[in-house]
Amino acid sequence: MGFFWTIVVLVVVLGFAWRFLGSYMAAVFDGRVHFLGWLERPVYWALGTGPDHEQTWKRYAVSMIVYSGVAIGVAYLIMRIQGHLPLDPQHLGGVPQALSFNTAVSFVTNTNWQNYGGETTMSYFSQIGALTVQQFASCAVGVAVAIALVRGFARRNSPTIGNFWVDVTRFTIYVLVPVSFVAGIILVSQGAVQTLAGPATIHDALNGVTQTIARGPAAFMGSIMQFGTNGGGFFNVDLAHPLENPTGLTNLLYIVLTLSIPVALTYTFGKMVGSIRQGTALLAAMTIIFGVWVGFTSYAEHQPNPAVAAAGVANTHVGNTEGKEVRFGDTSSALFNVSMTQTSDGAVDSAGDSYNPMGGFGLLTGMMLGEVTPGGTGSGLYTILVYAIVAVFIGGLMIGRTPEYLGKKIQAKEVKLAGLAALVMPLTVLVLTGIAVSVHAGQAGPLNKGPHRFTEILYAFTSQGNNNGSAFAGLNSNTDFYNIVGAIDMLLGRFGIMIPVLALGGSLAAKQVVPPSAGTFRTDNGMFVGLTIGVILIIGGLTFFPAASLGPIVEQLSHGKFF
Amino acid sequence: MNLRVLWSALRLVLVSVVVLGLGYNLLMVGIGEAVFPGQANGSLVHYHGRVIGSKLIGQEFTSARFFEGRPSATSPTPYNAESSAASNYGPTNPALLQEIRANLARVLKQNPGIKASQVPPDLVESSASGLDPDISPRAAYLQAPRVARANHLPVGTVRALVASHVVGRFAGLYGAPHVNVLELNLALLKLDASQP
């Protein structure tokens, strides 16, 4: 019953976000929102740019890559020298090279894969100066790229697709800053910790124990990491930690924050291309897949853990409790983790490694579908638009016409770019997983045995290649091999898709619009929704099914066998 | 031209580090300190003028006179709040089976008269954070007879105490019913102190 109402609340709140945040974001990117102009103008002045400096797709891409590269360098440097910086009450000392590199890449690519335990590795300065900052920036970059692609559809005969610096600045100031502020206050009021005081030590508690409790500025990080679909928390266990996710309310708030921007961007898209229905069609495809995965995974986690059943604990009406927190319960934990793997968030409020085989399958496959349901901030929209172009192309082949999408002719160049963007991720993930299972350094990582051992490695590369950051945390991946190969995975999964997407935007913006005729293939009806879902499932299914069969599917089919 | 892009990028990154990272976070620390000082500092609980724990962080209770929390997978000791951790045992890992069997044996030994089929899973399976401050209401009721005996209290009194500490779903909707172990044990101590 509780779960049913949770879904109802979620649908209503996200409905509001879709309608109002969606139209607000369109206004922000069109330059119709000015109330924080006193913050906006000094930034343009410092950068020597402004809304009138339009960029071609190439300059847009160069700005984006240089900005990301510098961000990686600065974050890397802060972690390396944190021992000499202030705000280090635990005297943790500098972070090692390979780990700093992996972490810097991870936070700049919106992945937030974490090969470290936050409270035992990162000083407060690194947490806020190197990591929280990139949770703002990487989100804004993702959305900016998506908007640049949308402008490709919205503009005609245009050599330019907007200005990268202006898009990032506007989105940060008008969307991220206000919402993360309000959400941060709510989180603190519920008990999320936000302090610069060091750990609290308790001597001689009721039962005579002594306990030291790690603290820090975690609440604000929680707020922006979820709103920006980053997902990298302050503590080792991420959002399972009671000091960052203290109550059922904060758990729901985190889900709402994560889904808001990706869902609302479909409205923004519709608004900017002049037809809300076009955005609604994409949202429908997202929602149908998301709903199926939530149902499947929640059902799987509502079953007892096989080890509990084998030990003779016969409470069959209580689900899998290993690696879950009592205050959230089994189905709500599954809803949380599904929401984070179908976006590019990757936060966890329960240990994915201890999920039942089909529960883990639900999380893993959510990422394998390319994170478009609804996907990450910006990355969800631009990736589903890539799939939509593939769908339009297939539809065009069926009826024997040159395909069009939103009045733009989809020709060989666009189909090639879309194909490239759709295949970079599966190719990277599968090749790197293949390497990891073949070399000793890769085989040394997993904690568990049998098929679950393979799943841990596959999950790690799927997660990083999709810029998700969720983990089967039994994998010991703080090694030179996993740090460096993982960073390559994240860089290809981010920029290997963003660059063709921007090229696509540039190519579309330069085109004329073809007026719709009776023979135009419609892209705002149920048929197109079905076709898009088909493309998403076929690309994900065909590329990943063999790999998934070797992991969770074998584990599920080997009833009662322990490895 | 590319050098200019580099300078723009560097400036934007540094402005972000100072304003969004340091400045904004310190502002939130200040607001937390001013408006919600208890929560912002970790919801610490006081008893007789000293801090005896955090409401949100579980502790290890081993004495029979206290309610016990869930198994914890942190290392090197359980409920190590300096280093949160889950077991990360996969569902088909024999180590998980072994651990659950050991936990079950302990629960059955401590609470005579209880059958394995009555034990709720949260008492034998470890939590996601290793610091779960809560147990399910069933797990609390199961321990009530033992706790009552050890404290020389009527079982009915202890059961009533558990009942008054069950926290329902948030707004009746969200999360799962639970009992905070530290608060329950604190109430038990106060009850003991008020007995003649």
Image: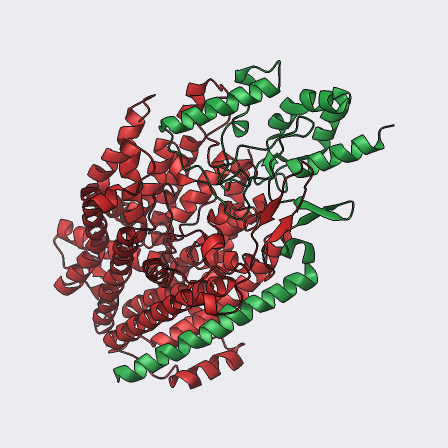
Chain colours: A red, B green
Q: Quadrant of residue A219?
A: bottom right
> At 52% across and 58% down in the image, what residue appears?
A223
Give the total of numbered labels.
0
- Residue A530 sits above or below residue A70 on the image: above
- Residue A115 sits above or below residue A272 on the image: above
Can residue A124 be seen at all in this image of the molecule? Answer: yes
> At 13% across and 56% down in the image, what residue appears?
A401
Q: In this rendering, would B164 be left or right of A299? A: right
> At 40% across and 79% down in the image, what residue appears?
B11
Q: In which quadrant will I find the C terminus of chain A? A: top left
Can residue A274 be seen at all in this image of the molecule? Answer: no
Q: In which quadrant will I find the N terminus of chain A? A: top right
- Residue A27 sits above or below residue A458 on the image: below
Q: Quadrant of residue A555?
A: top left
Q: Position of residue B103 (x, y in %)?
A: 51, 25
Q: Quadrant of residue B196?
A: top right
Of A469 and A279, the residue lying toward us: A469
Of B93 and A502, the residue lying toward us: B93
Q: Position of residue B76 (x, y in %)?
A: 49, 40
Q: Position of residue A263 (x, y in %)?
A: 42, 55
Q: Position of residue A229 (x, y in %)?
A: 42, 56
- Residue A543 sits above or below residue A67 on the image: above
